[in-house]
Amino acid sequence: MHIAIKSLVAGITLSAMAGVTFAQSVGKLEDQIRWRQSAYHTMAWSMARIKANIDGTYNKEQVVEAANVIQAIANSKMGALYQPGSDKGKGWKETRLKSEFFGSPDLGQIAGNFNAAANEMAKVAAGGDAGAVKAQFGKLGESCKACHDKFRKED
């Protein structure tokens, strides 16, 4: 992996960790919403990069880079950015988090499935098999969709 990508992944991870510490100590809900929106936009961009490689000319290095970014965010403990009350308010834009998120008995399972799928995506991407990447990408997308369907308001 290129040094620049390693730096990006390390930077995202460190930023997320610093953000969690700040969120716990200061607790500004607008910042928490903004940080998680940024993380999800970065993941969406990374998902689009993987999809472009699956649908077009496959470039293992690009897929590995994108999968590693998704994995880093998935493992960043960004759950701390979901403080009570953060279902209302604005980060970069109005939050789309449904109030049902808080106290949901399904949350742990949904989050765990996403984390496992993101970790497996990085592992499969490193193997370089485009067919296996496509299959795992579908599973990763389903894990994202499970949370969106249950906890995200539509625009």
Image: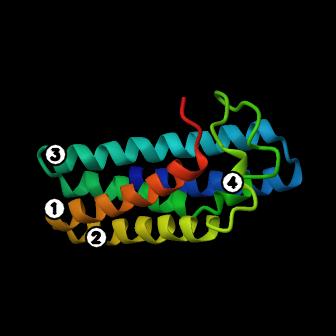
Give residue 138's position: percent from left, percent from top.
30, 59
Work out whether 86 lies above or below 13. above
Earlier sequence position, callout 4 versus callout 1: 4
Secondary structure under tag 1 reads helix
Q: Nearer the viewer, mark 3 or mark 2?
A: 3
For residue 101, which numbered disc appears in the image? 4
Circle number at residue 111 = none
Q: Residue at x 40, y 52 (%)?
A: 5
Is residue 69 depicted above or below 112 in this figure?
above
Label 4 close to label 3 by CB (< 8 Å) = no
Q: Marks 4 and 3: which is nearer the front?
A: 4
Answer whether residue 97 is visible to the viewer in this image: yes
Q: Could you tell me the amino acid type at mark 1? A: Ala
The amino acid on which the numbered mark 2 sits, given as a three-letter code, is: Val
- The residue identified by callout 1 is 130
Quote the CA–CA distance across marks 2 and 4: 30 Å
Query: Where in the figure is residue 110, as x and y percent of width and height?
Result: 55, 65
First of labels 1, 3 by sequence position: 3
Residue at figure coordinates x 53%, y 57% from the top left = 73
Mark closer to the observer (2, 4)? 4
Q: Earlier in the sequence, mark 3 or mark 2?
A: 3
Residue that badge 2 annotates: 124
Left or right of residue 155, residue 79 in this image: right
Q: Estimate the spatial distance between the alpha carbons at disc 3 and disc 2, rounded to whole Å.
A: 17 Å
Residue 65 x, y percent position in the rendering: 34, 55
CA gap, disc 2 and disc 1: 9 Å
Q: Nearer the viewer, residue 68 or 48?
A: 48
The mark nearer the N terminus, 2 or 1, is 2
Contact, mark 2 vs mark 1 (Cβ under 8 Å):
no
Where residue 24 appears, x then y in whole percent? 83, 56
| C-alpha separation, residue under disc 4 versus residue under disc 3 | 34 Å
Mark 4 or 3 closer to N-term? 3
